[in-house]
Amino acid sequence: MHLLQESAPLARQWAAELCAADPITGERCSWYHGIWQYLRLLGVAASPWLQEEFYRTALGRLAASGAYRRVLISGTTDYAMLELVSLIYASQGAPLAVTVVDRCATPLRLNRWYAERFGIDLTTARSDLLELGNEEPFDLICTHSFLGNFSPSQRPRLFVAWNALLRQGGKLVTVNRVRPGAPARLGFSPEQAASFVHKVRSGVGSADLHGITAEELVLKAEAYTARYRTHALTSVEELRSLMRESGFEGELHDPGGAGADAHGPSDAGQARRVLLVATRR
């Protein structure tokens, strides 16, 4: 928790300085990156730590083998995935060299901050994942809730790119929400936005906030719910098809069941998270 308290005001500052305008929309992403650490502090943001058991099981055995040293973190909001991966590898006494790729400089700066603090071998690349080149293939790609950044028509290119970045036998480990029946482009409904902002407003009284007032955080939460959009993944079969057609074979765990997701827009009783470990053929 102390790392979040320390990094939240840094992320807010760096977002104001580093988040650049999208070349297509012209919109900066500081509304997102500047508030994310505070949302994690309040327990209303989804991070890889929500699926810690899955990642520890999947990555722990790969780390222990010694054959998955070169790791690519494919898109990130902050250092959460780097933190989780590095702790899992450290628990196995396994060598680790990480590359983090993202289009925005703010999460990359956060990852460097974390790596410098804990002595992690880290390279950062500011790039669209679809345009990332590498001289040496990676052993492992890790990501979390990344498919929502890509429309259904773009996702085949994403899986092909992931496949090309891995060596033969390399692994893709990821978690993603599946939202049956959701519209292709999903945001908060008015009711969901009101509920989310209420959680933020209720949490700020007991949280140890740094660098921001409760009133400003609530206003930023309102802006967050108004702007947030994701490309919904609506079926597990789409995920299976993307794997098959891009050269992956894998273990896909669909836990079944469903429920309202407290960390983002969702159809109550429908959304769930699917866990994937895929191997490049």
Image (cartoon, rainbow, N blue to C red):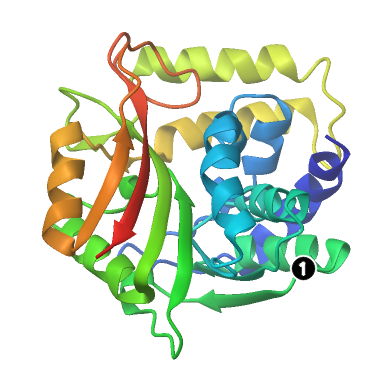
> Looking at this view, is 32 or 102 the one in front?
102
Q: Is residue 242 left or right of residue 223?
A: left
Q: Secondary structure at mark 1?
A: loop
Q: Is residue 133 visible?
A: yes
**Would you place residue 42 above or below residue 176 in this image?**
above
**Would you place residue 221 above or below residue 33 in this image?**
above
> Which of the 4 image quarters holds residue 207?
top right
Residue 60 point in image, percent of width and height: 61, 47
Q: Residue at x 81, y 15 (%)?
A: 205
- Count of all numbered marks drawn on residues in the image: 1
Residue 139 point in image, percent of width and height: 47, 69
Q: Residue at x 33, y 12 (%)?
A: 258
Pointer 1 local density, CA inside 10 Å: few below 14, some 14–19, many at least 20: some
> Looking at this view, is 127 or 72 the one in front?
72
Q: Is residue 188 visible?
A: no
Residue 230 point in image, percent of width and height: 32, 41
Q: Quadrant of the C terminus?
A: bottom left
Q: Residue at x 58, y 31 (%)?
A: 53
Q: Quadrant of the N terminus?
A: top right
> Looking at this view, is 181 or 237 the one in front?
237
Residue at the bottom extreme, as displayed: 135
Q: Is residue 15 left or right of residue 208?
A: left
Q: Which residue is mark 1?
A: 120
At label 1, the amino acid type is Ile
Q: Residue at x 54, y 77 (%)?
A: 125
Residue 215 point in image, percent of width and height: 73, 26
Q: Is residue 112 left or right of residue 127?
A: right
**Would you place residue 151 above or below residue 125 in this image?**
above
**Would you place residue 107 above or below residue 237 in this image?**
below
